[in-house]
Image (spheres, rainbow, N blue to C red):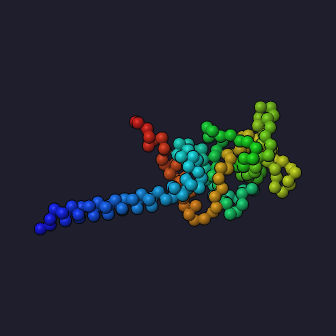
Amino acid sequence: MISVAEEVNNMERETRNKLIEFIVFVSVLNIPFLSIASTIGFETFLDSFEHPQDYEWFSNMNLQGVTSETSNIIVQKTHHPDFTLTYGDTIVYFQENMGFQCGQIDLVSTECHQKIYYIILEEQPLSYQPVFEEQVVGKILHTIDNDIWNSLTLELWQTATMRLNLISFFSSN
């Protein structure tokens, strides 16, 4: 026969073990999210759940201006509600004969109600490449080293943003 004290002790031990299991489970589950949130910034991380279609992760793209060590890039697309471009931003743009390119904005002008961004060409430092507003895909927010952990967390982040929507968690419906 088990005494009441032993039974309470066993229940406390079981409860403590289950609590520890739960904490470990939640911690392990959240490590990739905490890692990517600290890498891309918490504001971008949270906004990506509210506007999942406005962010894109590109991996192993050989874009002019992005080094091979940082081949993972996070791009905010042009249709994001808060999208703006200014001097010094690095943009991804599409040229019909060259494909996707990237470059840093050195000059912005408006001609005939159309914005034109001038990019300095790396191979010719005194030459500018005009990029029209409709050619711009988005701006690079972050470059991330290409390693297995970053690739895994980025893949998980992109999948989660497409499957989940932060607003749905807090809606009262």
Q: Residue furthest front?
A: 5
Image mark count: 0
Examine the rendering and report whether any part of residue 122 can be seen.
yes
Q: Which of 137 and 42 lies nearest the eye of the viewer?
A: 42
Q: Residue at x 14, y 65 (%)?
A: 3
Could you tell whether 9 is left or right of 28 in the image? left
Could you tell whether 5 is left or right of 119 in the image? left
Q: Residue at x 44, y 59 (%)?
A: 27
In the image, residue 10 lies at what x, y percent?
A: 23, 64
Q: Residue at x 32, y 63 (%)?
A: 17
Could you tell whether 138 is left or right of 17 in the image? right
Quarter of the image with the N terminus is bottom left
Q: Which of 97 and 133 lies nearest the eye of the viewer?
A: 133
Q: Residue furthest left?
A: 1
Examine the rendering and report whether any part of residue 93 can be seen.
no
In the picture, residue 153 is in which quadrant?
bottom right
Q: Residue furthest bottom?
A: 1
Q: Residue furthest top?
A: 113
In the image, residue 60 lies at what x, y percent?
A: 65, 60
Q: Residue at x 72, y 57 (%)?
A: 66
Quarter of the image with the C terminus is top left
Q: Is residue 113 above or below residue 96?
A: above
In the image, residue 19 lies at what x, y percent?
A: 34, 59
Could you tell whether 76 is left or right of 133 in the image? left
